[in-house]
Amino acid sequence: MTKMMNLSPETVSLLLLLALLSPTLLLCSGDSTTVEDESPPTVCIIGSGIGGSSVAHFLRNYSASTALSRSRILMFERHERVGGRMRTVTVSGDTFEAGGSILHPKNYHARDFVKRFNLTVRSPTAIEESSAVGIWDGKRFVFKTFGSSVKIPFVDKIVSWLNDVYMFVRYGLSLLRMSNFIENMIDNFLKYYESLESRPVFDSVEGMLKWSGLYNLTKVTLLEKLSEAQLSPLLVNELVTVITRINYGQSVLISGLAGAVSLAGSGGGLWSVEGGNWQMAEKLINHSDVTLHLNEQIESVSHLGDYYELKSAKGNIFKCDVTVVSTPLDEVDIQFSPAISIPKRELQHTHATFVRGLLNPGYFGMKSVSDVPALVGTLEDPLIPFSCISILRKYGATDMTYKMFTRQPASDSLLDELFSARTETVRIDWGAYPKYHAPEVFAPFILDDHHLYYVNAFENAASTMETSAVAGENMARLIVSRFMTKESSSSSPSSDTKSCSSGLHSDM
Ligand SMILES: Cc1cc2nc3c(=O)[nH]c(=O)nc-3n(C[C@H](O)[C@H](O)[C@H](O)COP(=O)(O)OP(=O)(O)OC[C@H]3O[C@@H](n4cnc5c(N)ncnc54)[C@H](O)[C@@H]3O)c2cc1C
Ligand SMILES: *[C@@H]1O[C@H](CO)[C@@H](O)[C@H](O)[C@H]1NC(C)=O
Ligand SMILES: *[C@@H]1O[C@H](CO)[C@@H](O)[C@H](O)[C@H]1NC(C)=O
Ligand SMILES: *[C@@H]1O[C@H](CO)[C@@H](O)[C@H](O)[C@H]1NC(C)=O
Ligand SMILES: *[C@@H]1O[C@H](CO)[C@@H](O)[C@H](O)[C@H]1NC(C)=O
């Protein structure tokens, strides 16, 4: 108030005029009741998936008693629901995971979220536990286990095959070498849960991966890495290929790290969240004092001196001190000003098709549908038109719900070949995960010299719900530490106009 009264009437009317002319000033003056008050900083998060919601959650946790403690968190989501690639689909009244579905027992952030927010862990049902796996080469099943002998929690993952005598007869000791390879990767990954005192804040994906010992795995293909570990070509070309095709829709030419993460879904104890994994994002958002803007697609992010101006497709304008991009930028059209530079990356599309009906045993050269394994995985052959098909639910001997993944949209004619009956079909086209290469290149976590951050740079390491949470946790620490540095390195007191940009100064 005092400063206000010291202003000459001319200045006041000029300020009022400016406020009328400039929507950003208007927004800003609406935020604080008095002009001289430093309004709390505004952190804007683009994307409401597990990555963005983890950033919000950990920001609240780590910024207590820092310059960001009173920050406003705005989150923008282009769709009408939160969760992003965590989403359920309803097929004849039953709900199934359509995107990210399986969590590993050592996904500690996800476990913590479920516990913290009283969500329920969903364990596999009896049907899911006792189904058979088959590996289809386009003409015949090169390998098949039998329903009672192999347990697969969640039909779309292969588990406990290590104990399976059929597997051992075919793949031998290579299975143990593969298991070692996976365990080593997991041990390294567990370093990301170490205490804050012993764990640095990472400002690049490379640094983050080097510290845990995972970086080298991104430099070679899974095929090279497994050959080096002396896995038999049979195991790599069959079982490993089946798994990478199920999890990443790609071959064993993906990076060793993406491959190891994909294989880790084979250790048993896999789980999901009862009612849908997307509820993790919902709860994180709801308990982090976030102002959520649904149906608000951000179209541009402009750095205007000492703040960011975000414009949405609806024409709304938001003013932010910190902007966090928590969506892959590869297929979304956000204009950055000044322009940002990130390596070109393509997304692998996975077409998830849900069918209520019955598989056609004739397609697989079988007489009875009960001879077709509950999970059909496939080899890497361009002539095979699908990556996998699995039973989600059995209503009766001739009435089931299936989930199929394909790299191309599943045409009606393909579905008519594969299924003898179809009463309901639901198709979802996912821009699912990066196309992995070796050596992998990474976008920066910090996209400019200021406070523009990119969580999904980490997706070139691997794309899972947990890795997004781990990247989000580090991002929250990075933002807090850089924001504090900025605050303390700045000595000049804020002018009235600067108070509108929430105490952020452009000199670093
Ligand atoms: C078919 C499939 C199966 C999978 N299986 C598994 C699995 O079994 N286990 C596992 O752990 N992971 C799995 N994953 C991967 C996992 O789902 C993802 O890695 C994870 O959910 C990514 O979360 P995210 O928050 O980083 O990104 P996203 O979930 O993609 O969130 C980004 C959000 O940003 C929004 N957005 C984008 N652009 C804008 C804009 N301009 N303005 C506003 N909002 C915008 C999007 O709508 C979206 O909601 C699977 C993925 C798919 C597709
Ligand atoms: C942050 O999280 C830790 C671990 O859950 C908790 O003990 C602590 O109280 C939290 N701090 C704040 C400020 O929320
Ligand atoms: C979870 O449930 C416990 C006990 O029922 C309750 O005390 C707690 O407040 C709940 N937490 C949340 C986040 O709902
Ligand atoms: C990664 O590779 C480099 C160079 O080949 C090597 O010096 C380093 O020891 C390797 N790191 C790990 C953790 O294997
Ligand atoms: C979020 O929490 C508030 C109060 O804690 C509750 O009223 C609201 O229903 C919750 N919203 C969702 C989407 O869970």
Image (cartoon, rainbow, N blue to C red):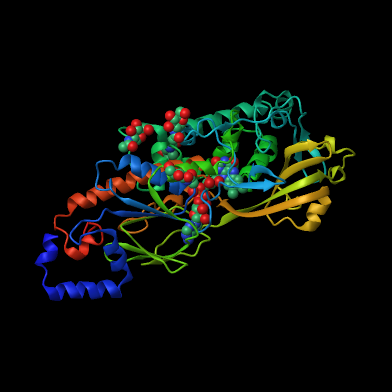
Residue 396, percent from left and from top: 81, 36
Residue 336, percent from left and from top: 40, 65
Is 416 on the left-hand or right-hand side of 104?
right
The one nearer the camera, 350 or 206, is 350
Is 479 on the left-hand or right-hand side of 125?
left
Seen in the picture, residue 131 relative to 379 is either above or below; the reply is above
Seen in the picture, residue 137 relative to 332 is either above or below; the reply is above
Residue 156, percent from left and from top: 67, 38
Q: Quadrant of the C terminus?
A: bottom left
Is 200 on the left-hand or right-hand side of 456?
left
Total numbered badges shown on the rendered structure: 0
Seen in the picture, residue 189 relative to 81 is either above or below; the reply is above
The one nearer the camera, 55 or 367, is 55
Residue at x-position 66% and y-position 41%: 241
Q: Quadrant of the N terminus?
A: bottom left
Is 387 on the left-hand or right-hand side of 27?
right
The one nearer the camera, 345 or 29, is 29
Residue 210, percent from left and from top: 40, 41
For the question of whether residue 202 can be seen, the reply is: no
Seen in the picture, residue 64 relative to 425 is either above or below; the reply is above
For the question of whether residue 302 can be seen, the reply is: yes
Residue at x-position 28% and y-position 45%: 69
Looking at this view, name the residue that lies furthest to the right: 367
